């Protein structure tokens, strides 16, 4: 990510937690590590299960092939071993 993109996102009030906070209350975001983003999809890894959840700034979840999946499926697959 370029410095210009970072400044633009900050100016828009976007943090690297914004996408995950659309799915989870802020207090549960500490269960995840921000791993970066590819295009519009933000990647988070669960600290215990080590599984990823991928979500964009509209709250849409994606599988590892960047195909849209239901948010409940994404959360269950990520949070349970």
Image: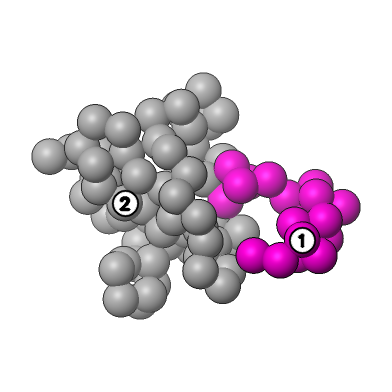
Check disc 1 and report its element: helix, strand or loop. helix
Residue at left offset 61%, top offset 47%: 16
Does the magenta run of residues contain 28? no
Residue at left offset 43%, top offset 38%: 33
Q: Quadrant of the C terminus?
A: top left
Specify the quadrant of the image occupied by residue 59.
Answer: bottom right
Q: Quadrant of the N terminus?
A: bottom right
Q: Is 48 left or right of 3, judged from the image as shown?
A: left
Residue position for label 1: 3
What percent of the width, then of the height, locates residue 28?
45, 27
Specify the quadrant of the image occupied by residue 49.
Answer: top left
The magenta stretch is 1-19
Q: Is residue 22 visible?
A: no
Residue position for label 2: 52
Q: How many marks?
A: 2
Q: Is residue 3 visible?
A: yes
Q: Nearer the viewer, residue 38 or 80?
A: 38
Q: Is 79 left or right of 62, judged from the image as shown?
A: left
């Amino acid at each position: 990510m370029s410095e210009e993109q970072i400044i633009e996102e900050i100016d828009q009030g976007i943090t690297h937690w914004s996408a995950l906070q659309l799915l989870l209350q802020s207090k549960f975001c500490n269960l995840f590590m921000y791993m970066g983003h590819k295009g519009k999809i933000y990647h988070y890894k669960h600290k215990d299960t080590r599984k990823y959840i991928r979500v964009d700034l509209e709250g849409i979840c994606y599988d590892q092939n960047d195909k849209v999946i239901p948010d409940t499926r994404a959360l269950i697959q990520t949070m349970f071993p």
